[in-house]
Amino acid sequence: MTRVPVRDDLRALEGYHSPQVHVDVRLNTNESPFAPPAAWYDAFAAELSRVEWHRYPDRAAAALRAGIAHLHQVRPDQVFVANGSNEVLQTLLLTFAGPGRAVATFEPTYQLHGHIARLTGASVLEGERAVDFSLDLAEVRRVLAAGSPVVTFLCSPNNPTGLVESQADVRTVLGLVPGLLVVDEAYGQFADWSAIGLVDDETPLVVTRTFSKTWSMAGSRLGYLIGPAWLVAELDKVVLPYHLDAAKQIAGRLALTFVDEMEARVQFIVAERERLSAELAAMDLDVFPSGANFILFRPRSMAGRAVWQRLLDRNVLIRDCSGWPRLGDCLRVTVGTASENDQFLAALTGALSPEAVH
Ligand code: PMP
C-alpha cells in the first residue's frame, strides 16, 4: 500500500512519550497519589444517571466555567476549559501561532510547549536557562528582541526542574513580551504564589491550570486557562464544538465542591516534598529546589540512567530525564504517598550503594 506523505514539517518530529511500566511504585507522571473523596464518587454516579445521553452536552460548559471562575474570583467569560491543559495549550497555539509566526520557550521546560507550537507550523525560539535552571532575564530580552514571538511561554513551577518563577521576573517578562505571555501553572497550587492575580482584560497574559494533579482527576482530562475575555472568545471559535462531554463537565464541576479536601492533599504533598528533598539532599545527589509535586535530582557519582534502571529493578518507576537536552544524568521523582516515598528512598539508597547488584 502506498503511504500518503505527511506534511514536510512533521516528518522530522518525534512524538511525546512517557513509558508506562507495571511496577509497585509508580512515581513518573506527576499525578496525585490519592483518589478523589468517596463523596465525589457518589455524587458523580448520581448525576451520571440523570444525563440525557441522546442530547449534546452544554457547549459552553457554563456550570463548570462558573465553578472555576468562582474558585479564582474572576468572571466566567475569562475562563476557557478543554480536555486537559494540553488541549488548552493546543487551542491557544492554533489560535495565535501557525506558519510564519514564532513561539519562545526557555529550556529546559515542558516539552509540549515547543512540540505543539511546531505541530501548528510555527517556529520555536529556544532560549536557554542559567546552569541552575533559573530564568536568565538577559537571555529573555535577547530572545524576545531577536525573534519577536507571538507567544512566550513560562512554566511555574517549571516541569521538569521544579523551580518557581518569582513574581518580579514574571512581571518583568510581561513588560517585555511583544505578544502573549502564557504562564503554565499545571503545578500552581504547590507553589507559594500564582500569576492568576495578574490577569485582566487589558493584559496580554493567560495562566493555564489542570485538574490532573491537585484535583486528583488525571483520568478525566480537564484543564483550563484564565485570561482576557476577548482572548477566550477567540479560543471558543477555534476549539471543536461540544469538545467537553457531559460526564467530564459533571466530574469537574463536582470536583470543585471538594476544595477543602483538595487543599488538604496539597498540604500533605508539600510536606512530603520537603521531607523527600531533605532526605535526597543528604545523599550523593544534586537536588534542585522544588515548588511542585516532583523533585529533580542528579546523581553525583553514577550515571543517571544506571540509577533509574536500578530503581526499576527494585520495582520503583521514576522519570528518566537523563537523555533529554540540557538535563544530562537528571532524574525526576513524583511525590507519592508516605509509603511510596519511603519505598522510593529505600530503593534509592540501595541503588546508590557501590555493592548494589542489578
Ligand atoms: N503543563 C505541564 C507543565 C505539565 O507538566 C503537564 C502534565 N504533564 C501538562 C501541562 C498537561 O496536563 P494535562 O493535559 O493533564 O492537564
Image (cartoon, grey):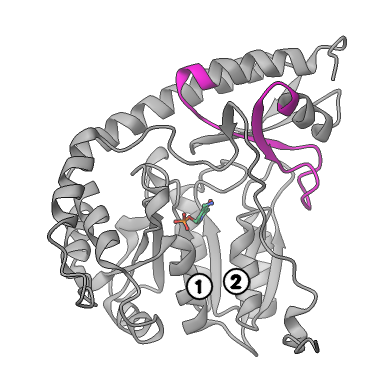
Which amino acid type is shown beneath numbered disc 1?
Gln
Instruction: Give residue 83's position: percent from left, percent from top.
Output: 40, 65
Instruction: Give residue 166's position: percent from left, percent from top.
Output: 48, 47
What residue is rendered at 64% in x and 89% in y? 99
Question: Which callout, 2 or 1, points at the residue further toward the start of the chain?
Answer: 1
Report how far apart the C-alphas of labels 2 and 1 lie in the structure.
6 Å
Secondary structure at numbered mark 2: helix
Find the magenta span and give its range.
312-340
The answer to whether residue 208 is left or right of residue 52 is: right
What residue is rendered at 35% in x and 73% in y? 203
Against 79, residue 94 (above or below) is below
**In the figure, residue 59 lies in which quadrant?**
bottom left
Secondary structure at numbered mark 1: helix
What residue is rendered at 44% in x and 61% in y? 85
Q: In which quarter of the image is the C terminus?
A: top right
Q: In which quarter of the image is the N terminus?
A: bottom right
Q: Mark 2 points at which residue?
A: 116
Against 65, residue 339 (above or below) is above
Against 33, residue 212 (above or below) is below
Q: Which of 346 and 232 is in front in this view?
A: 346
Q: Mark 1 points at which residue?
A: 90
Can I make out residue 185 in this image? yes
**In the figure, residue 69 lies in which quadrant?**
bottom left
